[in-house]
């Protein structure tokens, strides 16, 4: 307790002895106590909604198979349930969608209908800010050159809603002392459309193409009876453009985070960063980020050490132990990666294999002292 506080308390003690000032004292005391309580307990609450797949759910997963409309209906029920839960949260500051609305399937003709549909769902949210980052299923073929369609969707959505709609992959945002950032990791799997070569390389690369060794770790995900390819033939422009896009995106984020190092920085993205492996299959897979080493170094050296917490999505495993922080579904985050479960039923619709799906959303709070708390809210 400093000297000025002691002096103030002595003055209040003196005034208490004066009958004419008793009411004034009570008013001042109540104000001081109220102020102290607010300083100690006030926090900012937010909700992360991952992997809705409202616009691409039900697309055929196998050749010549019909769309599964019942999956879309189930996702809509889950989304309506989530909206209802969110409306009951007091002090909510913002809602952030961390990718995979399924915009890859909207196309130019259906965009207006998709915007109207989504705006109607969000119009009643008691929140001032609605934030977005793209997912790999928001871009056609996970192609960076398709990012404009996603950005146009978010822009048009902002025109329909009374809340402020922000694409965090374009600009950061400050709310109550927090600095919020988005990373467009939608292309970080680098699923480039390449020609596979199942024979040893016997000729020089054709002009305009790059020959790349097929990653041995990727072969583990292939059926056991299929001989893995040995080389990938990729168009030079595809490789160069994608690598430049990813580098520019990571540099943008690094500049944002390092511009105000004193802030509490939170980063939201879709595809989680290393060292997390994708647990969707039982095979040992490489981390979801298949990046140029220099781009990964920017993340490891200039972004992650400056960030208080990273929130990601993308996984569709039905095992709850794969979410939160290493299976811890409720706790504090201090320079760690929190993975939210999907809200969509995608890959968890087989009741025989998946009797208890792992679906839901994430609720987070950030206290005034910068402590970040999270908890997974399961959809039942």
Image: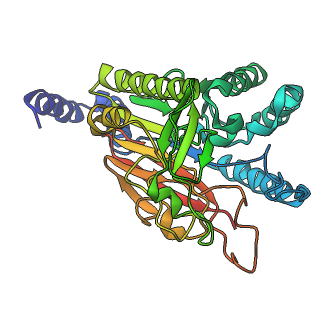
Q: Residue at x 46, y 66 (%)?
A: 284
Q: Quadrant of residue 180?
A: top left
Q: Quadrant of residue 291?
A: top left
The quadrant holding residue 120 is top right
Residue at 64% across / 62% down in the picture? 359
Query: What is the x, y in percent for residue 155?
Result: 70, 20
- Look at the image and tell me whether residue 29 can be seen: no
> Residue 377 at what x, y percent from top left?
58, 60
The residue depicted at 27 percent of the width and 26 percent of the height is 261
Which residue is at the front of the view, 212 or 26?
212
Residue nearest the viewer, comparing 281 with 150: 281
The front one of 6 and 92 is 92
> Is residue 162 visible from the viewing direction of this image?
yes
Camera-nearest residue between 338 and 136: 136
In the shown orientation, is residue 179 left or right of residue 370? Answer: right
Image quadrant containing the N terminus: top left
Direction from residue 67 to residue 13 in the image, left or right: left
The x, y position of residue 173, in whole percent, is 48, 24
Horizontal and vertical percent position of residue 76: 81, 52
């Amino acid at each position: 307790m400093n000297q000025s506080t002691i002096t103030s308390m002595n003055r209040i003690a003196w005034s208490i002895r004066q009958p004419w000032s008793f009411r004034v004292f009570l008013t001042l005391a109540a104000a001081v106590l109220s102020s102290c309580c607010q300083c100690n307990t006030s926090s900012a609450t937010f909700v992360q909604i991952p992997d809705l797949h409202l616009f691409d759910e039900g697309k055929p997963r196998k050749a010549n198979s019909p769309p599964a409309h019942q999956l879309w209906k189930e996702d809509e029920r889950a989304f309506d349930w989530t909206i209802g839960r969110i409306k009951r949260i007091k002090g909510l500051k913002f809602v952030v969608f961390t990718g995979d609305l399924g915009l890859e399937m909207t196309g130019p003709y259906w965009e207006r209908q998709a915007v109207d549909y989504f705006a109607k769902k969000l119009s009643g949210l008691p929140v001032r800010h609605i934030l977005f980052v793209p997912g790999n299923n928001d871009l056609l073929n996970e192609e960076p050159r398709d990012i404009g369609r996603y950005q146009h969707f978010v822009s048009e959505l902002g025109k329909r809603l009374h809340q402020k709609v922000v694409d965090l992959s374009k600009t950061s945002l400050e709310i109550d002392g927090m600095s919020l950032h988005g990373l467009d990791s939608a292309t970080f799997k680098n699923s480039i459309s390449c020609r596979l070569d199942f024979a040893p390389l016997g000729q020089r690369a054709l002009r305009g193409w790059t020959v790349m060794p097929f990653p041995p770790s990727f072969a583990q995900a292939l059926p056991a009876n299929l001989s893995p390819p040995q080389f990938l033939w990729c168009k030079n422009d595809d490789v160069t453009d994608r690598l430049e896009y990813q580098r520019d995106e990571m540099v943008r984020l690094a500049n944002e985070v390092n511009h105000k190092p004193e802030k509490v920085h939170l980063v939201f993205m879709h595809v989680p960063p290393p060292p997390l492996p994708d647990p969707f299959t039982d095979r040992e897979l490489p981390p979801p980020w298949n990046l140029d080493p220099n781009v990964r170094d920017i993340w490891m050296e200039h972004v992650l050490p400056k960030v208080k917490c990273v929130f990601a999505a993308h996984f569709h495993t039905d095992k709850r132990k794969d979410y939160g922080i290493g299976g811890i579904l409720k706790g504090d985050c201090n320079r760690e990666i929190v993975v939210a479960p999907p809200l969509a039923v995608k890959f968890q619709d087989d009741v025989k294999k998946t009797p208890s799906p792992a679906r839901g959303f994430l609720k987070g709070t950030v206290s005034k002292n910068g402590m970040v708390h999270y908890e997974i809210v399961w959809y039942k």
